[in-house]
Structure formats: C-alpha cells, structure tokens
Image: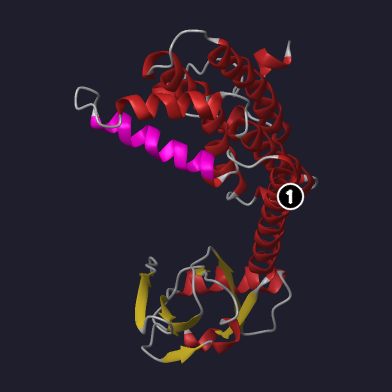
C-alpha cells in the first residue's frame, strides 16, 4: 500500500463531516502528510503567480486560500495530538521538532513566494473600496496581507535571512519550553493526608490510596497529579471536602493545573488580576 493510501491525512477523508480519524494515524503520519501537502501548495502558488491575467479575487485570492486548506487541517490535527499526552512517548520530541521546523520553514517560503504578495496586494487595492465585493472578502484579504507583511514579505537580502533565522529559533525555543513545562506537570505529585478527604466514599479512597502506594506514596497519603495550563502567575488553593482551605504556594512558579483525581474544589488565584478562577471538581461518593 502506498504512503498516500495508508495515511488518512493524505487520502481523501470519508469520515462524517470530514473529522480526523486519529485512531488510524501513526505519529510519523503528521510530518509525512505535511511534507506531501506543502508540495501540492507550492505547485498551486506557482500556477497563481504564472497566471498572465489581471489579478482578481477569483484567479488569485480564492485559489491561494484553498491551497492552504489541507495544511491547516494537518496543523490543527497535530496541535490536538500534541496536547493529548503523546509528547512523552519515545521519539515524540524529535518529531515535534521536525514538524515545527517544516511548518515554519514552509510558511516562511509562502510569505516570501516570488510574486505572490504583489498579486494579492493588487487584488486588495482593486476591491478594498468596492461595495459590490463582499465585505468578508475584503477583510479576509486585508488580514492576510498583514500576515504577509509581519512575516517579512517586504524584506530583502540579509534583512530577510536574519528575520527568518530568528523566527525559526524563537519557534524552536517556544516548543522546547512547552515540552519542559509538560514534563514538569507530568512528574509533579502533591501528597495529601488521607484524613483530609472527609466525606469522600471509602471505596474511592481505597482505590486512590492503592494507586498512590504504587507510585511510592507513604502510608496514609494520597498523591494528586497536576496537568493542564493557565496563563499568569498563580497560587492554587485547595478546598477539601471538610471545608478546610489550604494554599499550596509551592506550585506558584508554574502556569496552571487541574487536580486529578477529583475529590476537591480547586481555586486558582490570579494575583495580577486579584480574582479567582474556580473549577468545581465533582466525585461520586458511596
């Protein structure tokens, strides 16, 4: 079976509403699909700039937007897959680095594709004040031209080279930071005395205690795991089942979390805004 036929992100999707069949995908399929469709887009962009007709929305802007549709589907799929916990799998970090670099390099090439920015700009100049052209078309093209400009479409020579190199380095550092943050979340454990969980069903507590012991917890302790993320400098406040409140200051250097399992109400105190974000965690008791 060919790569195109076996990769659901390359073959035409026959799922309900075009949903992504994650269960059919292997980790390598995301990068393979991206590389395949970026070549398809390159050919579409070449056809646009080689068109000798006067640039219009129909022969320039529309085919440009359609050319990126598959790539954005893959990008969204990878983003979902990336956040699902796979990042700790063997080889996942290397794939994340390769996918990110391929994506950013391709977008850089699109924004500086010879002749494309000029054709899109010509279309916008012709339609920006034309009330016969749908307003959403004009707004969409205006936003896209700003993205081109912000990504170096008007830079040349060394200025462009330096800008693109810096952009790739920044993106790589962002991904490294995200990876380190997810690792710290995955490894964090908060040990809480089992007596603090008054009002929680006994069978549930026994299961939590057993699972905690398997992870090395002391006798009479339950380990709480942290995951997720929220922006800002925060101090989590745990509200136990018996109503007592205990701030957990030790976690304030992290960006955010959700407590698992679910015996508690969990308050995140946003110091900058002096406000509370409340997540009510519900459990089924005996």
Residue extending furthest top? Answer: 52
User: Residue placed at 41% from the left, 20% from the top?
Assistant: 62
Q: Residue 252 occupies which quadrant of the picture?
A: bottom right
Would residue 45 be found to the left or right of residue 145 on screen? right
Image x and y of residue 58, in percent = 38, 15
Residue 80 position (above or below residue 125)? below
At x 63% / y 25%, what residue is drawn?
114
Q: Is residue 9 left or right of residue 60?
A: right
Residue 221 shown in magenta: no
Q: Position of residue 175 (x, y in %)?
A: 68, 55
Q: What is the span of residues highlighted in magenta in the rendered image?
A: 135-149
Residue situated furthest left in the rendering: 131
Look at mark 1 in the image and give the residue it sits on.
162
Q: Residue at x 62, y 85 (%)?
A: 220
Q: Nearer the viewer, residue 277 or 113?
A: 113
Up the image or down, 119 lies above or below 157; here it is: above
- Total labels: the figure holds 1
Question: Which of these two is toward me, 67 or 262?
Answer: 67
- Which residue appears at 73% of the width and 53% of the height? 169
Asked whether 144 falls inside the magenta stretch, the response is yes
Q: Quadrant of the N terminus?
A: top right
Find residue 40 and report its image quarter: top right
Magenta stretch: dominant SS?
A: helix
* Residue 156 versus residue 176 in the image, above or below: above
Horizontal relation, residue 217 to residue 280: left or right = right
The percent position of residue 87, horizontal first and vertical second, equals: 69, 51
Q: Is residue 81 above or below residue 269?
A: above
- Secondary structure of the residue carrying tag 1 is helix
């Amino acid at each position: 079976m060919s790569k195109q036929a076996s990769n659901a992100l390359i073959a035409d999707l026959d799922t309900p509403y075009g949903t992504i069949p994650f269960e059919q995908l292997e980790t390598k399929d995301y990068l393979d699909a991206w590389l395949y469709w970026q070549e398809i887009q390159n050919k579409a962009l070449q056809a646009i700039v080689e068109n000798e007709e006067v640039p219009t929305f129909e022969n320039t802007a529309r085919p440009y937007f359609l050319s990126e549709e598959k790539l954005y589907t893959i990008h969204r799929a990878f983003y979902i897959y990336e956040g699902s916990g796979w990042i700790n799998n063997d080889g996942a970090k290397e794939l994340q680095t390769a996918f990110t670099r391929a994506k950013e390099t391709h977008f850089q090439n699109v924004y500086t594709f010879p002749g494309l920015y000029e054709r899109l700009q010509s279309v916008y100049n012709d339609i920006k004040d034309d009330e016969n052209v749908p307003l959403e078309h004009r707004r969409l093209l205006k936003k896209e031209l700003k993205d081109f400009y912000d990504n170096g479409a008007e830079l040349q020579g060394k200025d462009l080279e330096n800008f693109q190199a810096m952009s790739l380095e920044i993106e790589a550092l962002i991904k490294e930071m995200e990876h380190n943050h997810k690792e710290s979340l995955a490894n964090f454990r908060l040990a809480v005395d089992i007596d603090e969980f008054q009002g929680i069903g006994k069978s549930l507590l026994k299961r939590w205690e057993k699972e905690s012991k398997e992870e090395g917890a002391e006798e009479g302790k339950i380990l709480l795991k942290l995951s997720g993320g929220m922006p800002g400098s925060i101090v989590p406040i745990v509200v136990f089942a018996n109503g007592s409140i205990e701030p957990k200051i030790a976690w304030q250097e992290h960006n955010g979390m959700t407590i698992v399992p679910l015996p508690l109400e969990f308050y995140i105190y946003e110091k900058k805004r002096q406000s509370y974000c409340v997540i009510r965690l519900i459990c089924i008791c005996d």
